[in-house]
Image (cartoon, rainbow, N blue to C red):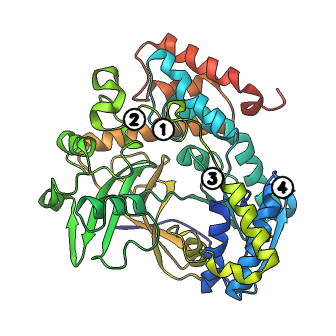
Amino acid sequence: MILPMSSSNKATSAAPVLTIVGAGSLNWGRHIVVDMMLNTDLAGAEIRLVDLNEHRLAMVLEWCEFARRRLGCEHKISAHSDLREGLRGATACLTAIAVGGDRLWRYDSTHPQLDGIFQAVGDTTGPGGAVRALRHAPVMRGIAHTLAEVGAPNALLLQLTNPLNALTACVDHIPGIRVYGFCHGYHDTEHLIARALGLIPLHAPHNSEWRKNIPTIRVELAGNNHFVFIDKLQIGDRTYMQKDIHELTPQIFDGPFREAVWSRYGVYVGNNARHPIEFLPGFNDRMNDFGRRWGVSPIAGEIDPLHGERHDDSEVLLQAALDEARRDFKSTESWNLRHSHEPIAEILGAFHTGKRFDVHLNLRNQGAIQGVADDQHLEMYCRIENAEVIRPSVRFPDAITAEIARVGQSQLLLARCCDRYDEELLFESMKLDALMPKDETVIRRLMREMVDFQRDLILPGN
């Protein structure tokens, strides 16, 4: 069964105007620009870089201009610290923002430990994911409303910021724009299966090169963002449906957590294990040493102070590359200007041209995953074709469908709270969360503490 989304989307032949909000990232943003320039469907596109950090923005712009010259492209690239100017006339916008940075992420993840709640990441679900959503929501709403006001008619907002489902859902009702979320978790799942099968080395880098000399590996997943399950798995010329995947076990298990989920629910859970372990009851608790029993650390390595001081030399390295390029343009020949493993340019190209592209997106369920409410935002395999989104219907075993629906309802309530802050909505959302204690007084007190700590960002102006 194929379920098309109702849409008035039309492909166009005019050159697109593509805006990246959060382009001051010294690593991610500039490589997405390279992907855009390498994509022939985006030939002649105007690319706008938007960020509040003008210093880093200037560095990224200069690097992108050197890259454009090296690639021989004719794209127009500009930098803007003013959101309105950056979005004026934009046909598509990417949102990749980090309100509060790693310091607040560390707070989100570690403060709940005082109540015995340990999160392996803390950016998607649980109390950490909830306050992260609330903190980002005012900025996200501002971006979406501005795009609707000054962007091109029916402009595309491709939302990349975690927590993906809640932040995508809190703006997708705004008229005049199309909103979808994107996460590369399905690529991560394909990569980990290739490693588990011994097709690539255990520490093979996750870039666009690892697929070159191995059989095709392709998954179709569905569920909640960072909590997805395989519906179909292609390895070489063979496609395994849900009922067939047992033929590949235990070879495709990369650790005890994935095997335990399979044993309990009869489905293969995707993503790096540190993400889905936060969603299910009975894994990330005291009895299981807060995830260590399953090979998962109780806190993300990127923000764990016990891992030592995090040293980011990205700015120093980028500045050195720019200094050398100014002296001698030939030095740019050593720059890595190949396509990244992110398919973002291909998504934009498909919406722009109407060509077919298969991908996973975050969007309203609308009957796609059977047994889950239509208005819940979920992640699923989709086909973009004729500038519309089409996705197949999926049925999972009842036990895991119930978990997907529980998480989806929790995130839907959180999204409504992001749209208009309501402590009761937040409380109801957290009561559905697998990591939260049964004691409702603890839930209320903890969430009030975490909201009050960053109230100026969650409720600016109040």
Q: What is the distance, in whole Å, between disc 4 and disc 2 at their CAs?
A: 35 Å
| Numbered label attached to residue 172 | 3
Q: What is the distance, in whole Å, between disc 1 and disc 4 at their CAs?
A: 29 Å
Residue 176 appears in the rendering: no
Instruction: Please state which amino acid type lies under the numbered disc 1.
Output: Ala
Instruction: Please state which amino acid type lies under the numbered disc 2.
Output: Ser
Q: Which residue is mark 2?
A: 297
Q: Earlier in the sequence, mark 4 or mark 2?
A: 4
Q: Which residue is mark 4?
A: 55
Q: Which residue is mark 1?
A: 300
Q: Are marks 4 and 3 in contact (CB under 8 Å)?
A: no
Q: Quadrant of the N terminus?
A: bottom left
Q: Are marks 3 and 2 in contact (CB under 8 Å)?
A: no
Mark 3 crowd level (few <14, some 14–19, many ≥20, 10 Å Cα): many
Specify whether 55 is left or right of 332: right
Q: Are marks 1 and 4 in contact (CB under 8 Å)?
A: no
Q: Earlier in the sequence, mark 4 or mark 3?
A: 4
Q: What is the distance, in whole Å, between disc 3 and disc 2 at their CAs?
A: 34 Å
Instruction: Please state which amino acid type lies under the numbered disc 3.
Output: Asp
